[in-house]
Image (cartoon, helix red, strand yellow):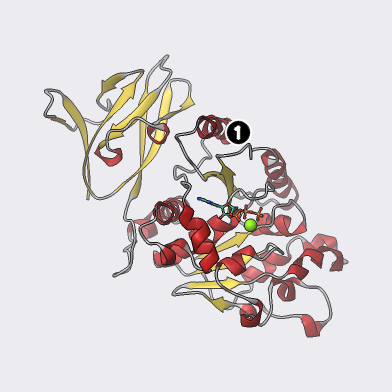
Amino acid sequence: MIIISVSNQKGGCGKTTTAINLSASLASLGKKTLLVDLDPQAHATYGMGIHAEKITGSMYNVMTDQAEKKKKFIEDILVPAGEGLDVAPSHILLSTIEQEFTNKEESVSRLHQILHSLSFPYDFIVIDCPPSLGFLTFNALRTSDLVVVPVELSSFSLMGVDKLLSMVELIRVKLQHTPKVLALPTMVDMRTNLSRHMMDQIRESFGEHVLSTAIRQTVHVRESQMKGVPLLRHCPKSKGTIDYLVLAQEIMAKTLPESEFAALTPPKGREVVTNFLRDFSVRTESASEVYIVGDFNHWSVSEQSRLWEKEKGIWQKKVFLGPGKHRYKFIIDGNWVTDPSNDHIEPNPYGGVDSVLEIT
Ligand SMILES: Nc1ncnc2c1ncn2[C@@H]1O[C@H](COP(=O)(O)OP(=O)(O)OP(=O)(O)O)[C@@H](O)[C@H]1O
Ligand SMILES: [Mg+2]
């Protein structure tokens, strides 16, 4: 069971959108998934089309330390939300929960105990955190294997991220628990200078701990939230749907044992993307810009095709590739070169050669 928190104290950076659509994508890829709404605003609950009259209780009843009659087991409050996907809904009362606990030490591991006492296992649990770094977020981080930090590229939302990282550090020191932290660029519109600038800032703050997938801006997000369904049910062809499916696969590649990920077979009859993550890197001293272009990105030079300098002289990028034959080249400060670490080259129609990678 892999537990993922979606957290950033900055409001409106895409936490709930990510929690809903990552959960739905994991489920559509055949992974049994539970979405836990831990935000008293209950946006993930509403975003999944679950309203008060449909629920028998909320995470408040599960987490509460109050009298027995209010208490419920997590299994009692789950709402089925499609094949392989359940939701543990939230309620505004969750905002009052911290004051209920007399034993503060024990209370920080409350969610951890609850999720590990589930009577049936999930492959993934995704937790939507509130936009604050209080008791609820601490509980979520404490039980998580991975923390996804959405960073909105259309505003200066890196403010406060250092506080989240300090909280993760505190959990490491106090509770000897070290979740992996990965930044996720959201609401990306690479045509704007601000997005390009923010992408550089994210890399400065998170180094290599930035997910390769970025979530593009699309009107379908708002439409699907109003309808109360995940993107893939609202508009399977939306770029948002594709981005979240690719994100789910990247997260699976980063968290599941390799054998399990390789054995992944997309369920029949479902809209899925079968791309796999490949690492490209090139060593080049004193370059200032390196791109990878190929048939997989229409040979286009853009922020999405730019490599980042992992360490002095070593440039790297992870790219999702589907099965088949792919031609590509690096562009180092304007010069087109083949991949020095790949011997497979083939002539191109322009009298030169391309690097070739075949994925079966
Ligand atoms: N990829 C996207 N394209 C367009 N709009 C988006 C995208 N992602 C999120 N939004 C919009 O941005 C707003 C904030 O998104 P969301 O509710 O997911 O953020 P949040 O971090 O959960 O907010 P809060 O901090 O209040 O919990 C919403 O109106 C949502 O529709
Ligand atoms: Mg939210």
- In depth, the one of 103 and 58 nearer the eye is 58
The residue type indicated by label 1 comes to Ser
Residue at the far bottom in the pictured view: 69
Q: Is residue 252 above or below residue 150?
A: below
Residue at the top extreme, as displayed: 286
| Residue 203 in picture, x, y percent from top left | 54, 33
Residue 152 location, quadrant: top right
| Element under disc 1 | helix
Provide residue 7's location: percent of width, then percent of height: 63, 52
Q: Is residue 131 above or below residue 185?
A: below
Label 1 beta carbon less than 8 Å to ligand 1: no
Going by the image, does 289 lie left or right of 61? left
The answer to whether residue 283 is seen in the rendering is: yes
Quarter of the image holding residue 340?
top left
Picture coordinates of residue 5 (x, y %)? 60, 56
Q: Nearer the viewer, residue 237 or 93?
A: 237
Task: Give the vertical position of 293 relative to 56 (above or below).
Answer: above
**Residue drawn at 57 percent across, 47 percent down:** 150
| Label 1 Cα crowd, 10 Å radius (few <14 / some 14-19 / many 20+) | some
Q: Residue at the right extreme?
A: 102
* 281 lies left or right of 92: left
Nearest the eye: 303 or 154? 154
Q: Which residue is mark 1?
A: 205
Residue 146 position, x and y percent, is 57, 52
Q: Nearer the viewer, residue 258 or 240?
A: 240
Residue drawn at x 39%, y 55% as measured from the top left: 238
